[in-house]
Amino acid sequence: MKFVRMLILALGLMAIATASSFATVAFSTSSTVNIMAVNAQTAPAGSILFTPIAPGTVNSGEIVNIAYQAPISYLADLTVTVIASGVTTTFAPGAFTAYGTGVTTGNFTVTINGTPLNTIVLTFNANTSFVANGTDQILVSGVRLDITTIATLPGTTSAFISNTTGQAAVLNPSLVVGTYSEPLAFATAVTAGGLTFKTDGTYTSNIITVTLNEVFSNAFETKGGANSTQISLSVGAPPTGMTLSALAVAGTGAVTATLGTTFVATTAASTYTINITAQNSNALEGVQIGFAYTATAGLSLTPPTISLQATLAPKPPATGAGSTYPYLGSLKFAARPVSSSLAVTVTPVKTNLIANYAQVLINPNPTLNPLWDTGITISNTSGNLPTTTTSGLAGVVKVTLYPSDASGAKTFTTSATNRPGLGLDANGQVPVTGTWVVLVSQLLTPAGITTDFRGIIRFQANFPAAEGLAYIADGNFSTIAMGYTLATDGPHF
């Protein structure tokens, strides 16, 4: 009899143990790992999958907590799907609109905690049986986090799973759901020539295109339409005398990009919005930004570069809807600009004129005019003359005298303190549509020549469309030889 009672007691304990074991489900958990823009305030976390490894039942009252390292900042995409014994219960995108308020469907209530804002709470409201058939599961996806307060490069973010009663046990409670990355980078190469101007405002190339690339394949993630991902592009002020006259954007690959800001030609620093309305989440793509500039005369020969900064945008508004969690509408990013610049090359505009023969014969009587002299006129025809096509530009003249005895060239440049003859302005420049009239005898002293001169003279005018004339006469200009036009002789100098 004692043996029988002991046997009955043992069988009872086994039944209790068996019932307790059947009321527990062990889940294997896994996650996908998303690449997250380090400045994302609505970064998509990887999905978390619970897979039962043996059949069992989770009793009513069990609570599963999924805690993230950063706040859950965007609720519109959050999805929870439970498949238990082949029955699917879905909390679809849009089911969650507030923190701290549970949403109940079927056997389950899901709550996004209000304090702190980083936990999803799954409550079992009824006994729920799972089978290990490869179909039953719990899937949590569409979670978006504000990682800006915790993200550092390089780095990852994790989710931590816990439960209240132990009915839904997990074998691996810590899961990496994201890794951090810079989202944007300017390409080093530029296309469409460059920005190459002349000091008179004309150009060799006034268009340049730069490319802003994704660093990882889904950095341009977009929700489309009014919720498109945006890039904020800041363009520095052009150098003095230049105007940003056109700005255009286009996508590479599957990217569709539009300029979301009305463009107005400007000489000031400006910020523009670029909308990304379509992209391929599995390919590295970019946005090409085309800049066109115009210029006026008087450009500096050493212009500064034009700065560029770009960041994924926008930041949340300071007040109103979307200014606090949960964020609404478009995806959000904190400012994290990447930089580049546009180089501007300015080359001087020069006209080389040459007097093939000029002479000065100094009079032995120093009080009298030279025995023979040469008159020179150099006109600045740039600007307003009907036949000109270049912008008007005043400029100085570099004068080089080459004696016929090959004794060595002598040179000087007109300036505010060196203005021989008539017609130069206060800075020693030949003004636009003006004419400089000078005698070769007046050129000798600034050139450092104290003797007679016979030879060639080159005039390097720092302005376009210079024209000149030379004529030889006696010292009193009572007898004048026929004048001749100064030759334009650029290639040799």
Image (cartoon, helix red, strand yellow):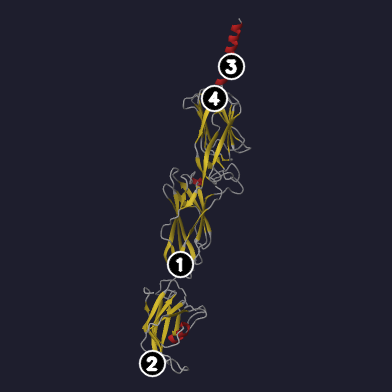
- Camera-nearest label, 4 or 2: 4
Looking at the rendering, which quadrant does residue 281 occupy? Answer: top left
**Residue type for callout 3:** Ile
The residue at 44%/48% (across/down) is 285
**Are circles 1 and 4 on residues that touch, CB within 8 Å?**
no
Q: What is the C-alpha distance between the residues marked 2 and 3?
A: 136 Å
Looking at the rendering, which quadrant does residue 106 occupy? Answer: top right
Name the residue that disc number 4 marks.
25
Q: Badge 1 local density, few (<14 within 10 Å), some, or many (20+)?
A: many
**Residue type for callout 1:** Val
Q: Position of residue 4 (x, y in %)?
A: 59, 7
SS at badge 2: loop
The residue at 59%/48% (across/down) is 317
Name the residue that disc number 3 marks.
16
**Residue type for callout 2:** Thr
Q: Which mark is residue 282?
A: none
- Viewer can see residue 330: no
Name the residue that disc number 2 marks.
479
**Are circles 2 and 3 on residues that touch, CB within 8 Å?**
no
Q: What is the C-alpha distance between the residues marked 1 and 4?
A: 75 Å
**Are circles 1 and 2 on residues that touch, CB within 8 Å?**
no
Q: Nearer the viewer, residue 108 or 333?
A: 333
Q: Position of residue 435 (x, y in %)?
A: 45, 81
Give the residue furthest to the front: 407
User: Which quadrant of the rendered structure holds the N terminus?
Assistant: top right
